[in-house]
Image (cartoon, rainbow, N blue to C red):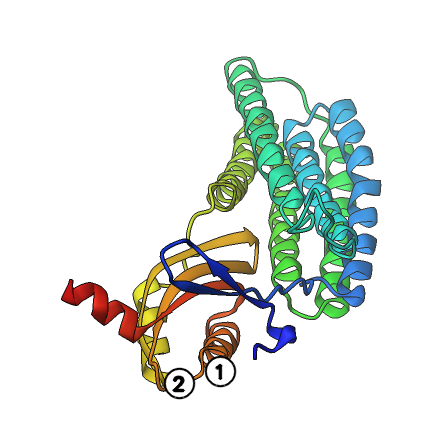
Amino acid sequence: MSNPENHIHTEDTGSGRAHDHDGDHDHSVEVTDKNARAVAWAGLLIAGFMFAELIGGWLAGSLALMADAVHMVTDAASLGLAWWAFQQSKKPADARLTYGRDRLPVLIAFANAVFLLVVTAWICVEAAGRLIEPQTVLAGPMFVIAVLGLLVNIGAFLILQHGGDGSLNIRSAILHVLGDLLGSVAAIVAAVVIYFTGWFPIDPILSVFVALLIVRSAIKVMRQSAHILLEGAPAEIDRETVRTDLLAVVPGLQDVYHIHLWSLAEGKINATMHAVISSDETTDAVLTQMRTRLKTEHGIGHVTIESSPDTEVDAKQDT
């Protein structure tokens, strides 16, 4: 008899074949309470200063500061998204959202990436205009605001470094903040150059440099989120490797095929497959070993396995 805990049920397809479906739902969250607090405080710190930098950049006439402020907007959004994802992950699945709400952050990330590309396009167009007709930039206020921005980013970095536990969301947030650090340094360099040389084109040149940092991050986020939304196979898992591993370590497993892999959300991998099981083995035992191996070795938390005995396969081959 099947173990109810394995969620295995038998389904008659009309062909006389019994199909065993093994569904192991892994709804564990990647962002812990500790991570959530870290991203919340870092996000609030960055969000609080980005408006000051945006206004200060506009008053000082510095496109580099405004570009860095836009970059801080993306970082605050990224940190907010990580916090929001944690809050959503605590909500249980229901009849309408049977997988839960894990894919909502992916959809928002894709939309946010599109918005970032539009913003960076505006920065580049504005920079081109300033290169043609340079505008006066107040180096003193620009330098002060850039230094304050650097200190804010250092503070956010330390919060994430010491407040997080090294999870994927935390590492991603740290990379965003490091990009902000570079943007603040660029603005400081531009202010120093303008103060000592009066060469105003350095401001739009460095603003384009910061914009390119945003484009690079935006394209990466867009590609990753689109791949998940299209239910693409995770890059870190190879189907043939999974098949070879299962056949090598699971006794009684004769063959496995029709393997489909996709990501429900970042770090949450689902799979379906068909297993041919030796008639000498108990189906439930083989399915349980397969599920355990897939979760512990390959990180696949939710797998549905359709099975059939090897005698049935042999009979079909004979006919």
Q: Where the N terminus falls, by quadrant?
A: bottom right
Query: Observer-nearest residue: 303 or 108?
Result: 303
The amino acid type found where label 1 is placed reads Ala
Q: Where the C terminus falls, by quadrant?
A: bottom left
Residue 2 appears in view: yes
The residue that mark 1 highlights is: 285
Image x and y of residue 272, in percent: 44, 59
Mark 1–mark 2 contact, CB under 8 Å? Answer: yes
Q: Image quadrant of residue 159? A: bottom right
Secondary structure under badge 1?
helix
Which residue is at 48% across, 81% downward? 289
Q: Is residue 303 left or right of residue 46?
A: left
The amino acid type found where label 2 is placed reads Glu
Indicate whether 160 appears above or below 14: below
Q: Is residue 273 left or right of residue 75?
A: left
Which residue is at 81% across, 33% downward? 51
Query: 10 Å neighbourhood of mark 1: few (<14), some, or many (≥20)?
Result: some
The residue that mark 2 highlights is: 281
Q: Is residue 110 left or right of residue 162?
A: left
Indicate whether 140 appears above or below 92: above
Query: Observer-nearest residue: 259 or 158?
Result: 259
Image x and y of residue 62, in percent: 68, 27
Secondary structure under badge 2?
loop
Q: CA distance from mark 1 to mark 2?
A: 8 Å
Residue 237 appears in view: no
